[in-house]
Amino acid sequence: MTRPLTLLGLESSCDDTAAAVVRQDDTGTRILSSVVHGQAEIHADFGGVVPEIAARAHAEKLDLCVIEALDQAGLSLSGIDALAVTAGPGLIGGVMAGVMMAKGIATGAGLPLVGVNHLAGHALTPRLTDGLHYPYLMLLVSGGHCQFLVVRGPEDFTRLGGTIDDAPGEAFDKSARLLGLAQPGGPSVEAEAAQGDPRRFAFPRPLLDRPDCNLSFSGLKTALLRARDGVVAEKGGLTRVDRADLCAGFQQAVADVLAEKTRRALRIYMGESPAQPALAVAGGVAANQTIRAALEQVAAEAGARFTAPPLRLCTDNAAMIAYAGLERFRLGHVDGMDLAARPRWPLDTTQPGLVGGGRKGAKA
Ligand code: KG4
Ligand code: ZN
């Protein structure tokens, strides 16, 4: 019999202020509420997230998010068993705003406090949405993250590799900018690519000559820039067909590299003979149909189940933080008032840090 637990989660590590309530009992795990207030408009004029502005906006919105999340769940703080909060990694002002708010609520309401690694929140989401069993292989692919993780437990992760420069979503966004397409770049590039010929331009397949699971995407963006300039020099401009072919070539290169590196990561993971092998993909880039189909195919070849949480739970949210906190709390892990906000916090501390940071700042 599972002891029923209800956690309130807070997230403020980047540009989304979020609060959520998650409950687990004998009938399963349910998200009772999940409130996300994005800051995209506040940062739009700056071409990226401005940490100071983000921190201020989080401080202004966190209490409103908590009230909304409790309201939607039909609960007051007396119905909450513990409070989970993102304690890093992320933009430090935002993380501090969340941690301070959580400490205040925990003290005022007499609730246990559980600090959560933001990346653990992403990595554990397939357990919340699809009930995956440990260990499973996780590929995080977004504008800020790109890494392969073997997820063995709520605090037990092995990183098999990751990007050494840009995250793939970041490469999509920069490429879209180079072609005058709308942001976010991923969906724009995908729409153009649907009309294009992926074979017309020769894009590299970075790092495939190396046997490891590390990835690199900044060279692909440069290749796109060169190919674009070549066409412009020759014809004086880009036609719609040129743009579509450039997008298709770029997207296919990203898909090929992700598929091949996933094949290698799966080989390592399957070597451990997991009882219920599974590949989970999370992050905005997992929305790309070409990439998704390629990854699904690779999982099928390896005999692993393929899952991708719904997009609203792949992007930053507090339900994943409440859930990751719930798993930690079940293990009896709680934090004190000395819980620190951490700008960097790798999930796998046995590995050297990755160079790649991503558009939204160094994540691990
Ligand atoms: O996970 P996410 O919403 O936020 C973080 O970056 O944390 O991911 C956003 C990224 C953006 O870079 C966006 O261009 C990319 O995911 N993206 C896509 C697609 N939809 C969103 N990339 C490729 N194809 C898509 N359909
Ligand atoms: Zn995130």
Image (cartoon, rainbow, N blue to C red):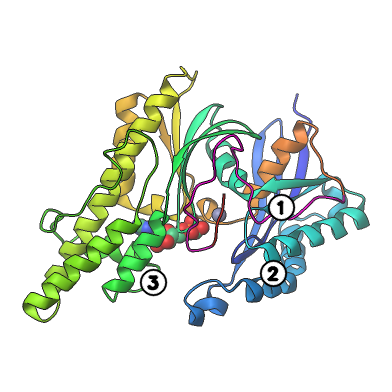
Between the C-alphas of marks 3 and 1, the distance is: 29 Å
Locate residue 317, reporting x and y percent: 60, 56
Q: Which residue is mark 3?
A: 183
Task: Determine which of the numbered discs, if any, sits on residue 58 in the image.
Answer: 2
Locate residue 225, reporting x and y percent: 24, 68
Q: Earlier in the sequence, mark 3 or mark 1?
A: 1
Amino acid carrying label 1: it is Ala
Which stretch appears magenta? 337-360
Quadrant occupied by the N terminus = top right
Task: Determine which of the numbered discs, if any, sits on residue 271 in the image.
Answer: none
Residue at 41% from the left image edge and 61% from the top image edge: 170
Q: Inspect the magenta stretch and tell me whether residue 347 lies in it.
A: yes
Dot 3: few (<14), some (14–19), or many (≥20) neighbours within 10 Å?
some
Task: Determine which of the numbered discs, if any, sits on residue 87 in the image.
Answer: 1
Whether ligand 1 has any atom under 8 Å from the Cβ at mark 3 is answered as yes
Residue at 74% from the left image edge and 69% from the top image edge: 64
Quarter of the picture for ligand 2? bottom right
Locate residue 278, reporting x and y percent: 45, 29
Locate residue 313, reporting x and y percent: 54, 51
* Residue 143 vertical position relative to residue 323 in the rendered view, above or below: below
Between the C-alphas of marks 2 and 1, the distance is: 14 Å
